[in-house]
Amino acid sequence: MTDTMTHYSNMLTTLPTKLYSAAFPSPDESPSSQDLMILVSTIAVMWAAIFSVLHRYLHPYAMRQQWLTDAMGREYDRVGLSMCKALRVKWTRQRYTEIMLNDWPKMQGIYLQHFIGGALCLPAVLGYTDSWAANLACLGVLSEMGW
């Protein structure tokens, strides 16, 4: 095994520990900017995988739902047409509905990501002063950055 391969092998075996240490540092230490960048990059990859899985499974579901198609059509009538005019795009009601149905799984992922990021901040918002509450809030912020 070459030195480079050994180096990368060691990096991969220590990655979970580095991620945990960056997300939940002990009170007397601070993670380095490199550790935080690795954590944010890992979170970004995790969210990309989640978004991909959601699209794979929710897209076929969305395309079969008449109620969702009807709701997208009503949205076009309510605000979509004026939005299209403001953006100077010429989408018909059908084209708008197709685009919104295609984006619907991604939007569910965005809602999920924001919910989890916000939920991680909840202990700090509720006034818990322990370091774990601050660490969770920071992890919530990093999750937003990773998105």
Image (cartoon, rainbow, N blue to C red):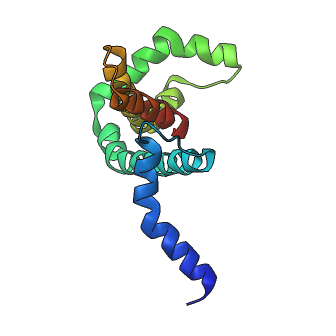
Residue 121 visible, this orientation: yes
Q: Residue furthest right?
A: 88
Residue under the point 43% across and 42% down: 25
**Quarter of the image with the N terminus in it:** bottom right
Residue 53: where, in percent of width, then height? 37, 51
**Where, by quadrant of the figure, is residue 109 drawn?**
top left
Q: Nearer the viewer, residue 95 or 101?
A: 101
Residue 17: where, in percent of width, then height? 41, 57
In the displayed structure, would residue 12 be above or below residue 69? below
Q: Residue furthest bottom?
A: 1
Residue under the point 56% across and 24% down: 92
Residue 97: where, in percent of width, then height? 46, 28
Q: Nearer the viewer, residue 55 or 131?
A: 131
Residue under the point 71% across and 19% down: 88
Residue under the point 33% across and 43% down: 58
Residue 49 visible, this orientation: no
Left-right relation of 24 to 37: left
In the displayed structure, would residue 47 be above or below residue 74? below
**Where, by quadrant of the figure, is residue 90 drawn?**
top right
Q: How many marks?
A: 0
Residue 80: where, in percent of width, then height? 53, 16
In the displayed structure, would residue 101 be above or below residue 58? above
Q: Nearer the viewer, residue 110 or 81?
A: 110
Q: Nearer the viewer, residue 122 or 34?
A: 34
